[in-house]
Amino acid sequence: TDRTLVLIKPDGVARRYVGEILGRVEKKGLSIVALELKTVSRELASAHYAEHESKPFFPELLEFITSGPVVAAVLEGPRAIAAFRQIAGGTDPVAKAVPGTIRGDLALDGQQNLVHGSDSVESAEREIALWFPGLA
Ligand code: ATP
């Protein structure tokens, strides 16, 4: 069993898709072990997206992720990391995500793509420590 850090980004909260997205998570069979609505500081956003620091879209990405509250969650289950990325769909909601996925069904924009999910065991551990420092 593994754990993954999932974010419903500001566009997902603003568009009122929190229930829709958590519903898909639950239907997939993943368990919610931590859940919080949170306004993201620039410090947390920069740390979360540290790997993208040198990318041209980084400043805009920070603006976006700090533009309103996000829902942060830790999900647990067998292959939770891969399972969430499967139901999220590819990063680009049109070129990569297929219908039936969260992004494929509900998003259009390459940046405002509704959700984040950890991409490896190492990043999940790093991100869970960052977003939920109190969690074992
Ligand atoms: P996430 O890390 O949010 O789960 P991801 O792993 O699918 O997304 P990454 O390549 O790690 O994709 O990019 C992180 C986030 O940065 C994307 O989800 C998107 O919001 C934004 N992003 C990625 N590429 C671009 C781009 N070319 N232009 C604008 N924003 C981008």
Image (cartoon, helix red, strand yellow):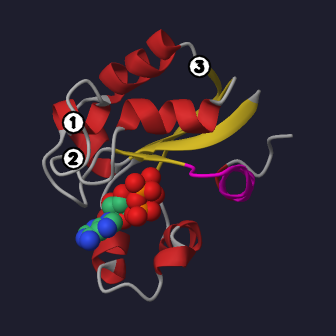
Find numbered disc 3 in the image and state the secondary structure of the residue it sits on.
loop
| Magenta run includes residue 46 | no
Q: Are marks 1 and 2 in contact (CB under 8 Å)?
A: yes
Q: Amino acid at mark 2?
A: Pro
Q: Is residue 22 above or below residue 95?
A: above
Residue 30 numbered mark, or none:
3
Q: Nearer the viewer, mark 1 or mark 3?
A: 1
Q: Which residues are magenta?
A: 118-129
Q: Where is the N terminus found, in terms of image quarters?
A: top right
Give how far apart the Cα atoms at labels 3 and 2 are.
22 Å
Question: Which residue is denoted by mark 1 in the rendering?
Answer: 104
Please name whichever residue, 45 or 89, is drawn nearer the observer in this view of the structure: 89
Q: Residue at x 28, y 40 (%)?
A: 12
Give how far apart the Cα atoms at labels 1 and 2 are.
5 Å
Question: Which residue is denoted by mark 2 in the rendering?
Answer: 93
Q: Amino acid at mark 3?
A: Leu
Please say whether residue 79 is visible from this viewpoint.
yes
Give how far apart the Cα atoms at labels 1 and 3 are.
20 Å
Q: Are marks 3 and 2 in contact (CB under 8 Å)?
A: no
Q: Residue at x 30, y 86 (%)?
A: 56
CA neighbours of label 1 inside 10 A, class few (<14), some (14 to 19), many (20+): many
Q: Is residue 61 above or below residue 9?
A: below
Q: Residue at x 57, y 52 (%)?
A: 119
> Which comes before the other along the chain, label 3 or label 2?
3
Ligand 1 lies in quarter: bottom left
Q: Amino acid at mark 1?
A: Gly
Q: Is residue 26 left or right of residue 68?
A: right
Quarter of the view holding residue 39? bottom left
